[in-house]
């Protein structure tokens, strides 16, 4: 029998993580869950560990170590705590692929550790490529490992490229739902509440990416993610708003032909494809029905009202540490918005401010990214304290 695929899920208690566990549960002969991790949701982590019997779990918040350790004391499961442990568990021999389903800059170090250990990456944690795409993709090339996209748009592009890897791409179109505030004016956005921003029309996701989707920062981050995943120039990447979220993205080839990947919005499909590529496994997910969507529509993004998209293009054009600064600022601004300390439009204002104030390094080392990330967080905080 073929060896099972050993999987580590960083961030198993989140939106992507829990859906990934559903995928793994559906194919017990194919997957072997080795590692699961969580920041602070100890109860769900314990529950998942009891059910799936992984080799190891990590609770990043080390004040919860004894809670998890005691709850799993009668199980044959190793329990670790602290963020450094994330970098160690991805190195286990039995792990073949690491699904990065944790949120934010925190994903960078464990992703690099996994690559250095020769593990394939199923990448949901787009912030890692936004912050340090150059180092991450270069190390992956050197190690000969693959980075399989989990983000639905990038999975769509990847699916369109299967069988076309030798054919040059002319450009790609990333589709965007437009979020809950599509068509709103700056004046209307000034008084938007946290509850309104957390209501995404088509997807149920973690809080940070939901706010990013409402502010179009998510699409900006995805543009940079696409640059690194598919080795594209900024001018080869375009964004088109498609409110139904059925066409997940498109590739245009040099003969003018365009390929799109379509389906109902369900993250389990791109998660599964990232883990089973090049195969497609049969699912019973609901199928698309044309009569439910007699019209698929497309429109331009409103880049004047939603500044974050252009800020991302600007960061991508500047290169170096510009996107690292933008990401750090955005993580702080989103956190402050979720704590109801700043308004919705202050997110983009903060990001623009930090991008201009933070130091810039054109050819950064890993340590430079760490320093610029910390500095940018500080500048973002200071602006609002
Ligand atoms: P989430 O908030 O639902 O889950 C995040 C997970 O990461 C949790 O398990 C949490 O315990 C863990 N975590 C949080 N902070 C951490 C830290 N500092 N260190 C270690 N672990 C930490 O988030 P999500 O919506 O599942 O998103 C995860 C990633 O996937 C993000 O980068 C997001 O942009 C990307 N993504 C999500 C979706 C989606 O549909 N949810 C779609 C595309 C891409
Ligand atoms: Mg996406």
Image: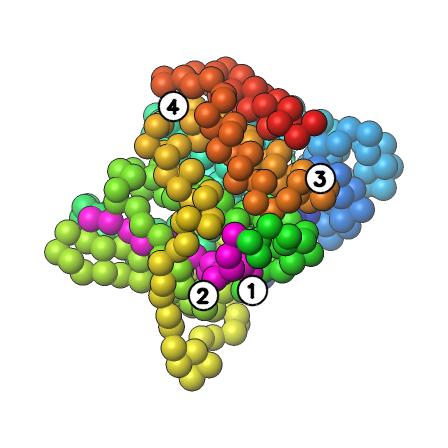
Q: Nearer the viewer, mark 3 or mark 4?
A: 3
Is residue 182 highlighted in magenta? yes
Label 4 near ligand 1 (CB < 8 Å)? no
**Quarter for ligand 1?**
top right
Would the CB of label 1 be found within 8 Å of ligand 1? no
Q: Residue furthest bottom?
A: 291
Mark with earlier residue (3, 2): 2
Q: Residue at x 75, y 39 (%)?
A: 40
Disc sitting over residue 108 in the figure: none
The residue to which callout 3 is attached is 341
Which residue sits at x=49%, y=45%?
Answer: 217
User: Whole-percent x and y of residue 100?
Assistant: 54, 40
Whether residues under marks 1 and 2 lie with C-beta atoms below 8 angstroms apart, the answer is yes
Going from N to C along the chain, the mark reached first, 1 or 4, is: 1
Q: Find numbered disc 3 in the image and state the secondary structure of the residue it sits on.
A: loop
Q: Which residue is mark 1?
A: 201
- The residue that mark 2 highlights is 243
State which quadrant residue 181 falls in. Answer: bottom right
Gap in Å between the C-alphas at discs 1 and 3?
A: 25 Å
Tell me, for residue 320, which label it has, or none: 4
**Number of residues whose C-alpha sits closer than 10 Å to that of mark 1, classed few (under 14), some (14–19) or many (20 or more):** some
Q: Which residues are magenta?
A: 170-186
């Amino acid at each position: 029998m073929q060896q099972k695929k050993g999987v580590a899920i960083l961030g198993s208690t989140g939106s992507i993580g829990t859906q990934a566990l559903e995928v793994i549960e559906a194919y017990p002969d194919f997957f072997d869950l080795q590692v699961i991790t969580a920041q602070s949701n100890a109860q769900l982590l314990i529950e998942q560990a009891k059910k799936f019997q992984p080799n190891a779990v990590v609770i990043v918040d080390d004040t919860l170590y004894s809670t998890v350790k005691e709850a799993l004391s009668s199980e044959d499961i190793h329990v670790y705590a602290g963020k450094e442990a994330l970098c160690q568990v991805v190195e286990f021999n039995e792990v073949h692929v690491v699904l990065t389903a944790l949120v934010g800059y925190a994903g960078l170090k464990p992703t690099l550790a996994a690559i250095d250990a020769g593990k394939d990456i199923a990448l949901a944690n787009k912030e890692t490529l936004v912050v340090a795409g150059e180092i991450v993709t270069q190390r992956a090339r050197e190690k000969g490992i693959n980075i399989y996209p989990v983000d639905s748009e990038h999975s769509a592009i990847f699916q369109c490229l299967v069988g076309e890897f030798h054919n040059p791409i002319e450009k790609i179109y990333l589709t965007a739902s437009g979020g809950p505030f599509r068509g709103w004016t700056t004046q209307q956005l000034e008084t938007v509440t946290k509850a309104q921003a957390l209501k995404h029309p088509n997807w149920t996701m973690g809080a940070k990416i939901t706010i990013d989707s409402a502010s179009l920062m998510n699409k900006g981050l995805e543009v940079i993610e696409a640059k690194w995943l598919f080795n594209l120039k900024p001018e080869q990447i375009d964004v088109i708003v498609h409110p139904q979220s059925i066409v997940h993205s498109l590739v245009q080839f040099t003969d003018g032909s365009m390929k799109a990947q379509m389906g109902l919005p369900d993250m389990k499909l791109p998660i599964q494809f990232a883990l089973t590529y090049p195969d497609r496994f049969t699912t019973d997910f609901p199928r698309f029905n044309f009569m439910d969507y007699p019209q698929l529509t497309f429109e331009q993004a409103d880049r004047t009202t939603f500044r974050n998209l252009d800020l991302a293009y600007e960061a991508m054009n500047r290169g170096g540490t510009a996107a690292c600064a933008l990401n750090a600022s955005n993580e702080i601004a989103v956190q402050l918005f979720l704590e109801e300390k700043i308004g919705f439009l202050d997110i983009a204002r903060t990001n623009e401010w930090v991008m201009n104030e933070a130091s810039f390094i054109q050819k950064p080392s890993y340590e430079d990214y760490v320093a610029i990330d910390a500095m940018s967080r500080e500048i973002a905080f200071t602006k609002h304290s």
